[in-house]
Image (cartoon, rainbow, N blue to C red):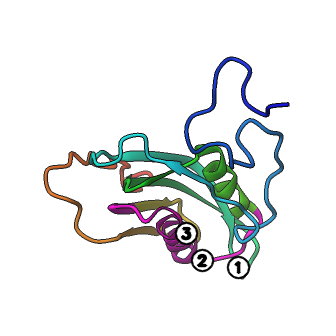
Amino acid sequence: MSDHHPTGPSAPGTDALSQLGRATTTPQSPEEAVLERVPSPHQGRQYVVRFTAPEFTSLCPVTGQPDFAHIVIDYIPGEWIVESKSLKLFLTSFRNHGAFHEDCSIAIAERLVALLDPQWLRIGAYWYPRGGIPIDVFWQTGEPPKGVWIPAQDVPGYRGRG
């Protein structure tokens, strides 16, 4: 009996996926989360993939209070792309994870780089204020390849009542 969707054949490289098309539960921590990848359907082309998580949450490691961020991840695939359901579950696993903003932001990027070995990746993590100070964290793997259109992240800086 096949686990494939009944309306058509599976895409190449998707047979080993353990989460897409199956019932899943939210991992209890980022360490438990399983990020999955599939072959890029356009290997040899340079294009940007963007994921936006406008309601990302984690916990302050000291107070246990919730922290909220708008996260934008851009990357130029090499041989692999991230499977989006596994990314959603990975990001959701931070809900009960205590870490500082900088740690969460860089950990997400580094985990994706280790999984995908992309040509280029950047993360913009726009954290909402706690204690009256918004913290934004930006990181990228290096200079993007020349000639690739990389749109601005266009997340406005926090203005308060300004």
In the picture, measured across the screen, residue 45 lies left or right of residue 131, that is left
Residue that numbered label 2 is attached to: 100
Query: Where does the magenta region start and end?
Result: 96-122
First along the sequence among labels 3 and 1: 1
Q: Nearer the viewer, residue 72 or 8?
A: 8
In the image, residue 87 above or below residue 60: above
First along the sequence among labels 2 and 1: 1
Secondary element type, mark 3: helix
Question: How far apart in space, not on screen, are marks 3 and 1 (Cα)?
Answer: 20 Å
Which amino acid lies under the numbered mark 3 shown in the image of this protein? Answer: Arg
* Pointer 3 with pointer 1, Cβ within 8 A: no
Residue that numbered label 3 is attached to: 111
The residue drawn where x is 65% and y is 50% is 86
Residue that numbered label 1 is attached to: 61
Which amino acid lies under the numbered mark 1 shown in the image of this protein? Answer: Pro
Q: Quadrant of the N terminus?
A: top right
